[in-house]
C-alpha cells in the first residue's frame, strides 16, 4: 500500500511536472511575444516622439526663416523707398521745400515775392552807386539767391526745433503703449498736445490715416516733410514692427535713447569744434579788419586797390583765394555723423 502510494505520488508528480513544463513552454512563448510587442510599441512611441520633435524643430525653423525673409523683404522695400526720399531731401522741388520750411505760401506767390525781392535788391544797388552792368547780376541774386536762402534758413531752424522735441514725443508714445493704449491713440495725443513742429507732423499722420493710409506708410512719409534721419528712423521702426511683430514699446524706447545719445554727441562735437570755428572766424575776418584799419589810418594808400585796374585785379584774385580758403575751413570744421 505504501509502495502503491509512492507510485501514485510519483505518477502524479510526473504528470504535474509535464503539465508545468507544457504550460511554461506555451506561456514563455506568449510572454516572449508580449515582450516583443512591448518593445515594438516603445520603439514606435520613441520614433513618434523623435518625429514629433523633428517636426516641431522644422516648424520652428520654417517660422524663423519665414519671419527672417519677411524682415529682409521689408528692409529692401524700405531701402528702395528711402533712396527715393533721399533724392527729394537732397534736391526737393520747390513745393516740397516750402512745406519742409513750414511756410504757407504757394509756388506762384513765392515766385512773385522772389521777383519783388530781386527788384528791391537791384534798386538798392543802384541807390548805393553800383554800375549799371551789375544790376542784372543783383536782380538775379535777389530773385534766386535771397528767397531760396531764406527758405533753407527756415527749413534748418524747423528741423532743429523738431529734433529738440521729437525724443519727448516718442517717450509719450512709449508710455501710452505700456499703459494699454493703441499706437494710433498715442499718435493722436502727440498731435494734440506736443509743441511745434512735432505737433504738425503727427497731425499729418492722423490726417493721412483718416483718408485710408496705414500708420506705417504715413510714418514713412514723415521724412518727406521733415528731412532728417531721425524721422526716417521712426518710420522704419514702425514699418518693421508692423511687418515682423515684436514689442513696439521697447523698440520705440530704444529709438528714443538713440536719438538722445545722438543729440548729446552732436552737442559734444559742437563744443569740441568751437575752438576751430573761432579760429576760422578770426582768420576770415582778419583781412577785412586790417583793410578797415588801413583805410582809417592812411586812406590814400589802400584806395589804389579800388581806383586802378591793377588794384581791382588784385582784389578779385584775393577774394577768389579767400573764398576758397573759407570753403576749405568750413569743410574742416563742419562735422557730420
Image (spheres, helix red, strand yellow):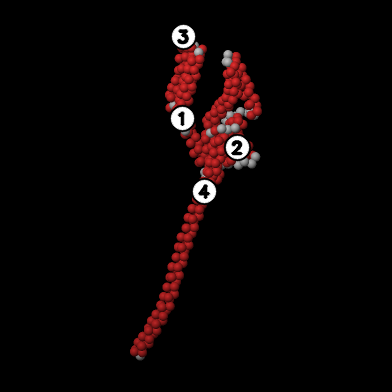
Helix, strand, or loop for circle 4? helix
- Residue 136 left/right relative to 322: right
Q: Earlier in the sequence, mark 1 or mark 4?
A: 4
- Residue 256 left/right relative to 193: left
Q: Earlier in the sequence, mark 3 or mark 1?
A: 3
Helix, strand, or loop for circle 3? loop
- Residue 143, quarter of picture: top right
- Residue 136, quarter of picture: top right
Residue at 53% across, 47% down: 70
Q: Earlier in the sequence, mark 3 or mark 4?
A: 4
| Residue that carries the numbered disc 3 in the rendered image | 298
Q: Which mark is nearer the camera, 2 or 1? A: 1
| Residue that carries the numbered disc 4 in the rendered image | 69
| Residue that carries the numbered disc 1 in the rendered image | 335
Q: Residues within 10 Å of mark 3 (few under 14, many from 20)?
A: few
State how far apart marks 4 and 2 are (Cα): 28 Å
State how far apart marks 2 and 1 are (Cα): 32 Å
In this view, which residue lies farthest toward the left? 3
State how far apart marks 3 and 1 are (Cα): 41 Å
Q: Earlier in the sequence, mark 2 or mark 1?
A: 2
Q: Which mark is nearer the camera, 3 or 4? A: 3
Q: Residues within 10 Å of mark 1 (few under 14, many from 20)?
A: few
Q: Residues within 10 Å of mark 2 (few under 14, many from 20)?
A: many
Q: Nearer the viewer, residue 229 or 210?
A: 229
Residue at 38% across, 81% down: 17
Helix, strand, or loop for circle 2? helix
| Residue that carries the numbered disc 2 in the rendered image | 205
Q: Nearer the viewer, residue 332 or 257?
A: 332
Residue 286, how many percent across, how many down? 45, 17
Cβ atoms at labels 1 and 4 below 8 Å apart: no
State how far apart marks 2 and 3 are (Cα): 64 Å
Q: Which mark is residue 197?
A: none
Amino acid at each position: 500500500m505504501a509502495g502503491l502510494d509512492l507510485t501514485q505520488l510519483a505518477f502524479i508528480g510526473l504528470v504535474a511536472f509535464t503539465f508545468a513544463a507544457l504550460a511554461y513552454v506555451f506561456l514563455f512563448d506568449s510572454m516572449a511575444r508580449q515582450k516583443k510587442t512591448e518593445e515594438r510599441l516603445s520603439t514606435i512611441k520613441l520614433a513618434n516622439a523623435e518625429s514629433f520633435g523633428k517636426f516641431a524643430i522644422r516648424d520652428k525653423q520654417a517660422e524663423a526663416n519665414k519671419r527672417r525673409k519677411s524682415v529682409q523683404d521689408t528692409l529692401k522695400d524700405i531701402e528702395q523707398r528711402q533712396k527715393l526720399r533721399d533724392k527729394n531731401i537732397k534736391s526737393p522741388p520747390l513745393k516740397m521745400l516750402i512745406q519742409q520750411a513750414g511756410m504757407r505760401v504757394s509756388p506762384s506767390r513765392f515766385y512773385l515775392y522772389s521777383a519783388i525781392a530781386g527788384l528791391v535788391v537791384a534798386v538798392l544797388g543802384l541807390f548805393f552807386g553800383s554800375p549799371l552792368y551789375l544790376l542784372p547780376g543783383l536782380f538775379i541774386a535777389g530773385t534766386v539767391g535771397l528767397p531760396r536762402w531764406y527758405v533753407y534758413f527756415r527749413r534748418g531752424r524747423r528741423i532743429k526745433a523738431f529734433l529738440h522735441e521729437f525724443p519727448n514725443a516718442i517717450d509719450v508714445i512709449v508710455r501710452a503703449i505700456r499703459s494699454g493704449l493703441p499706437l494710433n491713440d498715442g499718435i493722436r495725443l502727440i498731435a494734440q498736445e506736443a509743441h511745434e513742429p512735432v505737433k504738425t507732423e503727427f497731425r499729418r499722420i492722423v490726417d493721412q490715416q483718416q483718408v485710408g493710409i496705414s500708420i506705417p506708410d504715413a510714418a514713412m512719409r514723415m521724412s518727406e516733410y521733415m528731412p532728417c534721419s531721425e524721422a526716417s528712423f521712426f518710420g522704419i521702426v514702425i514699418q518693421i514692427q508692423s511687418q515682423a511683430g515684436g514689442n513696439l514699446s521697447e523698440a520705440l524706447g530704444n529709438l528714443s535713447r538713440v536719438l538722445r545719445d545722438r543729440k548729446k554727441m552732436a552737442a559734444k562735437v559742437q563744443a569740441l569744434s568751437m575752438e576751430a570755428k573761432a579760429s576760422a572766424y578770426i582768420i576770415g575776418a582778419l583781412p577785412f579788419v586790417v583793410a578797415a584799419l588801413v583805410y582809417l589810418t592812411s586812406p590814400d594808400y589802400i584806395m589804389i586797390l579800388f581806383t586802378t585796374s591793377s588794384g581791382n585785379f588784385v582784389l578779385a584774385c584775393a577774394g577768389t583765394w579767400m573764398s576758397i580758403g573759407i570753403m576749405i575751413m568750413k569743410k574742416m570744421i563742419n562735422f557730420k555723423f
